Amino acid sequence: MKYLVSWTMEPGAFNGTVARFLETGSATPAAVKLLGRWHGMSGRGFAIVETADHAALYTLLAQWGDLLKFETTPCLEDAEAGAVFQAFKK
């Protein structure tokens, strides 16, 4: 399953976030495939990840929970969403 993960830096967390990112590269667990990650200039960022191991994704987010506030939602690509929408076609 794919997930859209967005984050916002907690107030005062910039230096700690930068240091941890440079130290770890924000590596993902083996069970979590990073499809793309984007960093906004506002302290917000977004990633698309894919995993069947929800605990591995939770572990990744928990490792950053002291510095970042997360929102995570399952998501579908256009073709997958289109197949779902066909059920509503009149």
Image (cartoon, grey):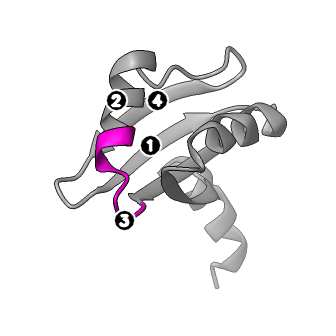
Q: Secondary structure at mark 3?
A: loop
Q: In the rendered image, which quarter contains the C terminus?
A: bottom right
**Residue pointed to by mark 2:** 19
Three-letter amino acid code of the residue under disc 2: Ala
**Residue pointed to by mark 3:** 11
Picture coordinates of residue 61, whole percent (x, y): 63, 43
Look at the image and tell me whether residue 1 can be seen: no
Q: Secondary structure at mark 1?
A: strand
Three-letter amino acid code of the residue under disc 4: Leu
- Which of pointers 2 and 4 indicates the residue nearer the eye? 2
| Crowd tier of the residue under label 3, counting other residues whose Cα lies within 10 Å: few below 14, some 14–19, many 20 or above | few
Picture coordinates of residue 62, whole percent (x, y): 68, 43
Q: Is 51 on the left or on the right of 64, as rendered?
A: right
Q: In the rendered image, which quarter contains the N terminus?
A: top right
Q: Residue at x 68, y 63 (%)?
A: 84
Three-letter amino acid code of the residue under disc 1: Ala
